[in-house]
Image: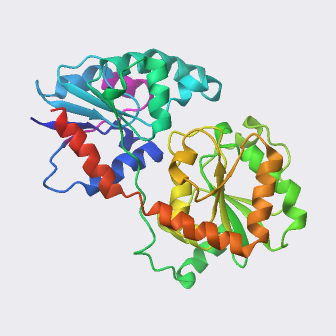
């Protein structure tokens, strides 16, 4: 029986979900055969391709894996879908009218029709059960992986030119890596930073990495940027390990996550992490990060100040975080995923 992969997500803008699929496929060797179903259609055309044309390309009796939250409702083959989060259902105010309408119509029906569901955390599993009412035996939790720093040569000289380009040369910095959108709580980080910036070493900056549209600051209610803050925009993947490694700390305090890969990546490169105490994040980071309430600015500020003023605390969280990150690997994620697929062929 053939295993088909609905790889439509790889044709769109690079995202956490496309990285998930790319990493899993790169870890599957010749002993794990599959066939990708590609489409360069986006938007409405992409949805139509997925619902109408993709099912026609599948062999009867085959299996389709849809790895990116969506998939065709009506197909002759067996069907496994990966759900990364249910944010459009849990917090529809964070999405556009078109997006939340489509997903509110599609997701509950899809979750009931598919043969099996893979999800990336027990938190998301609980949200699937609540929204769709499916039996928990129909759901497998397979954590995301992380590529650690053990094979990377952290040569500061190699990174020096990129630091100059980013405007962070000769600066110590707190790093935050995420898309710049409301649920990531950038506004909260900035508010917390403004409370402590005059009480920490004056050579420490707050650096944000993440692609954003030109209107993002007004969209998320930011009018004034505090001092010593640098939004550097998109950074190539090859430079992220260096940014993590040479940071004083990493901060990531979203209101909602289905997994939360950036804190784990930061941990794998030795950066002490401050992150949210809600949704999936405590499940992923355990007791190896400083957990704060993302809705409490004073708590975020105190977490930042504690980490930046206490070298022993930074070193302790860096050590614990690195040990925690070693529990996750993309090789294991890929093998567990393929095993689930084979069990449903």
Write the residue at 41% across / 45% down. 18
Write the residue at 81% across / 56% down. 302
In the rendered image, which quarter is residue 273 located in? bottom right
**Residue in front for this viewpoint, 208 or 290:** 290
In this figure, what is the number of numbered marks? 0
Q: Is residue 234 magenta?
A: no
Check the picture and name the quadrant holding the C terminus. Answer: top left
Q: Is residue 37 magenta?
A: yes
Residue 168 seen in this snapshot: no
Vertical order, 263 against 165 (above or below): above
Direction from residue 295 to residue 178 in the image, left or right: left
Direction from residue 134 to residue 116 in the image, left or right: left
In the rendered image, which quarter is residue 321 located in? bottom right
**Residue in front for this viewpoint, 300 or 9:** 300
Vertical order, 182 against 106 (above or below): below
Vertical order, 216 against 106 (above or below): below
Write the residue at 58% across / 59% down. 288
Residue 297, horizontal then vertical, whole percent = 81, 46
Write the residue at 17% across / 44% down. 34
Q: Which residues are magenta?
A: 35-50
Check the picture and name the quadrant holding the N terminus. Answer: top left
Residue 335, horizontal then vertical, whole percent = 25, 51
């Amino acid at each position: 029986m053939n295993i088909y992969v609905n790889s439509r997500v790889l044709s769109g803008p690079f995202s956490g979900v496309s990285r998930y699929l790319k990493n899993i496929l790169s870890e599957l060797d010749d002993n794990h055969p599959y066939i990708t179903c590609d489409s360069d259609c986006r938007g409405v055309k992409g949805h139509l391709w997925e619902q109408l044309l993709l099912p026609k390309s599948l062999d009867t009796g085959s299996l389709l894996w849809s790895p990116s939250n969506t998939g065709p409702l009506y197909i002759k083959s067996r069907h496994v879908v990966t759900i990364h989060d249910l944010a459009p259902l849990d917090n529809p105010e964070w999405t556009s009218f078109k997006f939340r309408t489509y997903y509110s119509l599609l997701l509950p029906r899809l979750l009931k029709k598919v043969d099996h569901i893979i999800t990336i955390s027990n938190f998301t599993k609980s949200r699937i059960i609540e929204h769709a009412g499916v039996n928990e035996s129909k759901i497998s939790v397979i954590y995301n992986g992380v590529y650690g720093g053990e094979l990377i040569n952290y040569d500061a000289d190699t990174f020096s030119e990129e630091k100059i380009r980013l405007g962070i040369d000769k600066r110590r910095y707190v790093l935050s890596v995420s898309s710049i959108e409301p649920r990531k709580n950038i506004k909260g980080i900035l508010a917390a930073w403004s409370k402590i910036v005059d009480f920490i070493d004056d050579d420490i900056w707050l650096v944000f990495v993440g692609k954003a549209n030109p209107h993002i600051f007004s969209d998320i209610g930011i009018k004034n940027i505090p001092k010593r803050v640098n939004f550097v925009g998109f950074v190539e993947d090859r430079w992220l390990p260096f940014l993590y490694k040479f940071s004083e700390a990493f901060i990531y305090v979203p209101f909602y996550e289905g997994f939360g890969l950036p804190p784990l990546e930061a941990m794998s490169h030795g950066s002490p992490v401050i992150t949210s105490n809600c949704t999936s994040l405590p499940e992923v980071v355990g007791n190896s990060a400083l957990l704060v309430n993302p809705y409490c600015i004073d708590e975020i500020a105190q977490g930042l100040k504690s980490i930046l003023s206490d070298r022993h605390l930074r070193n302790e969280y860096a050590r614990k975080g690195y040990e925690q990150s070693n529990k996750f690997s993309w090789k294991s994620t890929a093998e567990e995923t393929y095993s689930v697929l084979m069990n449903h062929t």
